[in-house]
Image (spheres, rainbow, N blue to C red):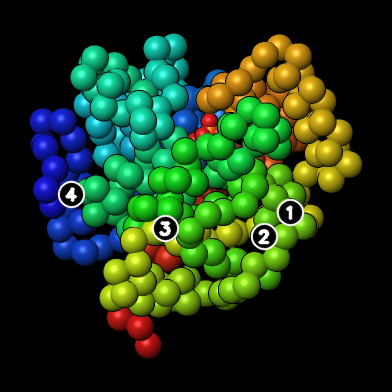
């Protein structure tokens, strides 16, 4: 791997797993710093790492601490990401500036994907991808997640995106319906459906041979009985978008604002659903990472 070890700290455990080709799952940190409230954020971060381990993969949560990229966080690092007030939300465009200033940041899907691919991690788990915001026609607000995934060869397990995907492969796990994060079904369908982690690993392997340079998105919907009540969802989303616009919340503050609004307005129901999404995606990502290390049968 060609990266600068003084700038990028990969834990011994992650480095060893990558060196002998065993399973590693990258995890983002914006969920921890800006996506979930304290103290649940730290508890969920630890739970996600535990489930990855229980499925036989090594978790590599990625963040920037005091001017250095960390791939793999120990308990103290995780605690800092969860509780420090000076941890900013970092997308790809911000990484270099933040590092050159010695700052600390939690990486979005875009930044995490970029860094994961850089160090050779093939599978990444998150909750939802940033997308194209509903009023994008006026605001031009489109998440950097999409542009980055279009040029980053990594497999991302998620439960939805705020709108359409660009040049990425999409596989829906156990369904032909694209999930809508808190909801099982976004209303969009997916051409390709897969049923097992090995199916995904086979596609990854073919993409590697063909040198396809973009991401593979594995959409993992919540079971219907676990989703947020669709009526509550629609009402709270409507209200949240109205409030965001009334308070002039724009750009990278929109997603954290909406998530916080959901958690309050649903009286914690969305928080439970959000946690389930992240844990389930981490589990599936670990199973895919393990299948990816084994020859196809
Ligand atoms: N979706 C969630 N929780 C999150 C995010 C998305 O349910 O915390 C975060 C992810 O880190 C994602 C980012 O990459 O928000 C997208 O932000 P933006 O739309 O500003 O690019
Ligand atoms: Mn956004």
| Residue 110, image quadrant | top left
Taking 230 as reference, is 258 left or right?
A: left
Report crowding for label 2: few under 14, some 14 to 19, many 20 or more residues within 10 A (C-alpha).
Answer: many
Q: CA distance from mark 2 to mark 4?
A: 34 Å
* Disc 2 within 8 angstroms of ligand 1 (CB): no
Examine the rendered structure and indicate whether residue 85 appears above or below residue 123.
above
Image depth: mark 4 or mark 1 in front: 1
Q: Are the residues at dot 4 and dot 1 in contact (C-beta closer than 8 Å)?
A: no
* Disc 1 within 8 angstroms of ligand 1 (CB): no
Q: Are the residues at dot 1 and dot 2 in contact (C-beta closer than 8 Å)?
A: yes
Image depth: mark 3 or mark 4 in front: 3
Examine the rendered structure and indicate whether residue 178 appears above or below residue 193.
above
Query: Disc 1 designates what residue?
Result: 186
- Judging depth in this view, the residue of 248 and 235 nearest the camera is 248
The earlier-in-sequence mark between 3 and 1 is 1
The earlier-in-sequence mark between 2 and 4 is 4
Q: CA distance from mark 1 to mark 2?
A: 6 Å
The structure residue drawn at horizontal position 76% and vertical position 18%, both measured from the top left corner, is 243
Query: Disc 2 designates what residue?
Result: 178
| Residue 102, image quadrant | top left
For the question of whether residue 53 can be seen, the reply is: no
Q: Secondary structure at mark 3?
A: loop
Q: Residue 215 got which mark? A: 3
């Amino acid at each position: 791997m060609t990266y600068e070890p003084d700038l990028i700290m990969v834990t011994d455990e992650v480095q060893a797993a990558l060196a002998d080709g065993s399973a590693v799952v990258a995890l983002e940190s914006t969920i921890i710093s800006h996506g979930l409230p304290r103290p649940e954020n730290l508890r969920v971060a630890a739970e996600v790492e535990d489930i990855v381990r229980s499925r036989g993969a090594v978790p590599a949560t990625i963040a920037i601490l005091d001017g250095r990229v960390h791939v793999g966080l120990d308990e103290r690092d995780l605690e800092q990401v969860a509780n420090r007030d000076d941890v900013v939300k970092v997308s790809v465009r911000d990484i270099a500036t933040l590092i050159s200033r010695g700052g600390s940041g939690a990486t979005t899907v875009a930044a995490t994907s970029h860094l994961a691919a850089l160090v050779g991690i093939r599978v990444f788990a998150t909750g939802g991808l940033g997308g194209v915001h509903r009023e994008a026609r006026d605001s031009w607000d489109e998440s950097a997640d999409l542009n980055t995934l279009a040029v980053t060869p990594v497999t991302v397990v998620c439960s939805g995106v705020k709108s359409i995907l660009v040049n990425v492969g999409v596989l829906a796990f156990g369904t032909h319906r694209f999930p809508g994060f808190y909801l099982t079904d976004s209303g969009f369908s997916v051409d390709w459906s897969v049923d097992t982690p090995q199916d995904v690993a086979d596609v990854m392997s073919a993409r590697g041979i063909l040198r396809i340079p973009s991401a593979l998105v594995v959409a993992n919907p919540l079971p219907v009985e676990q989703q947020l009540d669709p009526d509550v969802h629609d009402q709270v989303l409507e209200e949240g978008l109205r409030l965001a616009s009334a308070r002039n919340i724009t750009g990278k503050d929109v997603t954290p604002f909406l998530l916080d609004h959901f958690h309050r307005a649903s009286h914690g129901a969305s928080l439970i659903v959000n946690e389930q999404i992240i844990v389930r995606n981490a589990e599936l990502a670990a199973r895919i990472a393990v299948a990816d290390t084994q020859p196809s049968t």
